Image (cartoon, rainbow, N blue to C red):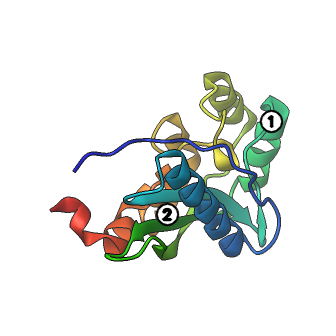
């Protein structure tokens, strides 16, 4: 099975119920990516964000925004949510069939001192990361534990993806 990676430029929703927002953004990405790739075959759209107290934190624009997010998350538990949308054309139809779901993982941060925050910010790993961290890298020092799918926190909930499309591993 051959895959083409397309990163579409879409207007993302930034406010509202976190689970609804990530699913809608994933849907927009799947439809735009499918259109850019010629409008046929399987298309996958994924959107991952961090939610705390019912609101999305998004990606920081600069180091100050990253520091604020890390300080806010320090010693607290937050949710990482990923919307996953698969589009595929049913036999005999041009209208894509959608399969979609949302993954949720709870992540608890350590109490972060300024030295740890400064070290992490200096790594610049926080750039272009929802919640200003990447758990699969140096960001692992920020995390005390998690409940749920680790791959969801990385940004692609593999378990959920395979539930939606088990034939991907055939």
Label 2 residue SS? strand
Q: Is residue 106 above or below residue 153?
A: below
Residue 150 percent coordinates (x, y): 42, 58
Outermost left residue? 170
At horizontal 75% and vertical 35% (from top left) the residue drawn is 114
Q: Is residue 98 left or right of residue 9?
A: left
Neighbourhood count class around disc 2 (C-alpha, 10 Å): few under 14, some 14–19, many 20 upward: some
Q: Is residue 104 above or below residue 135?
A: below
Q: Viewer-proximal residue, 108 or 54?
A: 54
Q: Which residue is mark 2?
A: 146
- Counting residues from the start of the chain, the first of labels 2 and 1 encountered is 1
User: How far, Cα to Cα, is label 2 from label 1?
Assistant: 26 Å
Residue 115 percent coordinates (x, y): 70, 30
Query: Count of labels shown?
Result: 2
Label 1 residue SS? loop
At horizontal 67% and vertical 22% (from top left) the residue drawn is 122
- Which dot marks residue 135? none
- Which dot marks residue 61? 1
Of badges 2 and 1, the one in the foreground is 1
């Amino acid at each position: 099975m051959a895959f083409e990676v397309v990163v579409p430029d879409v207007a993302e929703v930034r406010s509202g119920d976190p689970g609804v927002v990530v699913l809608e953004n994933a849907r927009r990405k799947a439809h735009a990516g499918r259109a850019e790739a010629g409008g046929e075959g399987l298309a996958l759209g994924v959107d991952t964000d961090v939610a705390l107290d019912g609101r999305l934190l998004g990606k920081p624009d600069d180091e100050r925004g990253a520091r604020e997010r890390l300080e806010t998350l320090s010693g607290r538990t937050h949710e990482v949510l990923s919307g996953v949308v698969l589009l595929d054309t049913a036999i005999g139809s041009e209208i894509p069939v959608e399969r979609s779901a949302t993954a949720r993982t709870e992540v608890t941060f350590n109490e972060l001192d300024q030295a740890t925050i400064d070290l992490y910010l200096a790594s610049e790993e926080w750039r272009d990361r929802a919640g200003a961290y990447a758990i699969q890298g140096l960001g692992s020092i920020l995390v005390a534990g998690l409940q749920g799918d680790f791959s969801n926190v990385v940004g692609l909930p593999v378990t959920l993806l395979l539930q939606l499309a088990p034939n991907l591993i055939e």
